């Protein structure tokens, strides 16, 4: 019998949840489980049987690099096939981000991904929040960070990404107000970048005092 992949552990026990069947139907980079279950409704009764597919991506980290002296942020552009499949422009504006390996601290991921995707080396981090992206079908949780950096002038940031993963990211250095204007105009279609920029808009004055 084939061993169950470590990245697709069984659903943990929880009061009111009865797992009737739990199988791994795809054992790729991100496994897919099919789970048959019932759960306790708010009135105390048990739900009917449900069958859900669960995409196991585990944990990730996203970073918004911010320069409090220049009052500028660094975002990235990269090609995203799912965006193309959705009928959108496949070149998405995002924050640097990556997946967390087992045993790796979120801030370690934040440092690694910021360097790999932007060439920047933050010297200070602040946790924005921890959240889920697709709780209707995926277990991925995200840690969002703001990172203090010194940014190059716009147009001098260049392109980055891991060649062995065929990754290609282009850095956008933008004044904070310009990034907020893009947010308001819905020119940023990435939820992670949207959350981080909304947070920065609220905390920007404080950061400029504390981080300058």
Image (tube, helix red, strand yellow):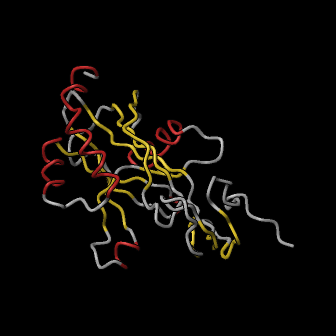
Establish if 118 lies above or below 208: below
Coordinates of residue 136 in the picture (x, y in percent): 46, 65
Q: Is residue 91 left or right of residue 138?
A: left
Q: Which of 134 and 103 is in front in this view?
A: 134
Coordinates of residue 120 in the picture (x, y in percent): 38, 39
Establish if 146 lies above or below 47: above
Residue at (28, 74) in percent of width and height:
88
Residue 205, by quadrant, is top left
Coordinates of residue 133 in the picture (x, y in percent): 42, 57
Residue at (57, 74) in percent of width and height:
48
Q: In which quarter of the image is the N terminus?
A: bottom right
Q: In this view, does 128 lie to the left or right of 152?
A: right
Question: Residue reaching furthest right?
Answer: 1
Task: Tell me how many marks there are.
Answer: 0
Residue at (41, 60) in percent of width and height:
168
Q: In which quarter of the image is the C terminus?
A: top left
Q: Which of 121 and 84 is in front in this view?
A: 84
Coordinates of residue 125 in the picture (x, y in percent): 40, 31
């Amino acid at each position: 019998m084939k061993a169950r992949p470590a990245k697709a552990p069984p659903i943990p026990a929880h009061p009111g949840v009865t797992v009737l069947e739990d199988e791994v139907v795809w054992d790729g980079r991100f496994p897919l489980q099919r789970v048959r279950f019932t759960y306790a409704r708010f009135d105390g009764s048990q739900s009917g049987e449900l069958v859900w597919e669960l995409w196991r991506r585990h944990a990730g980290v996203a970073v918004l690099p911010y320069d409090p002296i220049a009052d500028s942020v660094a975002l990235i552009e990269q090609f995203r096939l799912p965006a193309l499949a959705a009928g959108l422009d496949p070149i998405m504006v995002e924050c640097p981000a990556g997946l967390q390996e087992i045993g790796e601290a979120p801030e370690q991921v934040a440092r690694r991904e910021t360097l790999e995707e932007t060439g920047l080396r933050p010297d200070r981090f602040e946790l924005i929040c921890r959240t889920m992206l697709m709780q209707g079908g995926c277990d991925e949780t995200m840690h969002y960070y703001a990172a203090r950096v010194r940014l190059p002038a716009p147009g001098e940031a260049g392109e980055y990404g891991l060649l062995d993963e065929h990754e290609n990211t282009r850095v956008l250095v933008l004044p904070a107000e310009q990034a907020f204007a893009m947010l308001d105009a819905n020119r940023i279609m990435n939820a992670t970048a949207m959350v981080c920029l909304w947070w920065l808009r609220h905390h920007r004055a404080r950061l400029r005092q504390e981080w300058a």
